Image: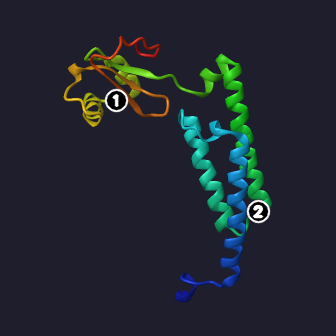
């Protein structure tokens, strides 16, 4: 094993990383600006996967000599175009939107947990209590609603808020 190669393999790889990295980064930024804010919105699990994929593709372009800048830019462009297409179809087709994204789930209403909804969402009573504490609540009885959002985050609506009229699964 050549220990010196572990730390430095030559200037060619460093120069390639600098040039290709800067160009790939610029391409990604311009492409994201052109495609709009919705491309990177984290509204659901599908959006999260796309965001992670952007990072993975950019890292591959930067570090793999087997991937040319043109190939990497094509992969980024394809992912942006697919994300744009899916979000556009979601806006125009309710059935398509339901197929690609989850619905929010009401886990607690007026201080009472909803066991069936919690079971389907795989959320324990202890986790629900932790979510309420994180949001500054003291106990479940003082909360109007807890909703598991489509992006995996929780919304906690405190007692005294306007009546909660939520069209969520698990109601």
Image quadrant where residue 118 sits: top left
Q: Callout 1: helix, strand or loop?
A: loop
Q: How is the image coloured?
A: rainbow
Q: Callout 2: helix, strand or loop?
A: helix
Neighbour class for label 1 at 10 Å: few (<14), some, many (≥20)? Answer: some
Residue placed most toward the observer, 123 or 144: 144
Task: Name above or below for residue 170 compared with residue 75.
Answer: above
Image quadrant where residue 38 sits: top right
For residue 169, side relative to residue 59 (left or right): left
Provide the residue designation for mark 1.
Answer: 123
Work out which quarter of the rendered image holds the C terminus and state it: top left
Neighbour class for label 2 at 10 Å: few (<14), some, many (≥20)? Answer: some
Residue placed most toward the observer, 16 or 23: 23
Q: Percent position (x, y) of residue 109?
A: 31, 15
Task: Name above or below for residue 34 compared with residue 90.
Answer: below
Image quadrant where residue 64 sits: bottom right
Mark 1 or mark 2, which is nearer the start of the sequence?
2
In this rendering, which labeled residue sits more in front, label 2 or label 1?
2
Q: Percent position (x, y) of residue 13?
A: 68, 78
Q: How many marks?
A: 2
Q: Percent position (x, y) of residue 155?
A: 38, 28
Q: Percent position (x, y) of residue 126?
A: 24, 32
For residue 104, side relative to residue 46 (left or right): left
Residue that protrudes farthest toward the right in the picture: 70
Provide the residue designation for mark 2.
Answer: 69
Identify the residue at image location x=52%, y=87%: 3
Identify the residue at image location x=78%, y=58%: 71
Work out which quarter of the rendered image holds the N terminus and state it: bottom right
Q: CA distance from mark 2 to mark 1?
A: 43 Å
């Amino acid at each position: 094993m050549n220990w010196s190669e572990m730390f430095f393999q030559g200037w060619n790889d460093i120069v390639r990383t600098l040039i290709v990295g800067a160009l790939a980064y610029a391409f990604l930024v311009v492409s994201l600006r052109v495609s709009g804010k919705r491309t990177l919105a984290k509204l659901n699990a599908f959006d999260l996967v796309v965001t992670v994929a952007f990072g993975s593709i950019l890292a591959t372009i930067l570090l793999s000599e087997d991937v040319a800048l043109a190939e990497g830019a094509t992969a980024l462009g394809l992912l942006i175009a697919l994300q744009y297409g899916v979000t556009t179809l979601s806006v125009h087709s309710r059935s398509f939107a339901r197929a690609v994204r989850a619905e929010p789930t009401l886990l607690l209403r007026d201080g009472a947990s909803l066991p069936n909804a919690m079971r389907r969402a795989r959320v324990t009573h202890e986790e629900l209590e932790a979510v309420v504490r994180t949001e500054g609540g003291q106990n479940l009885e003082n909360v109007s609603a807890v909703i598991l959002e489509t992006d995996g985050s929780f919304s906690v609506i405190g007692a005294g808020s306007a009546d909660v009229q939520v069209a969520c699964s698990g109601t």
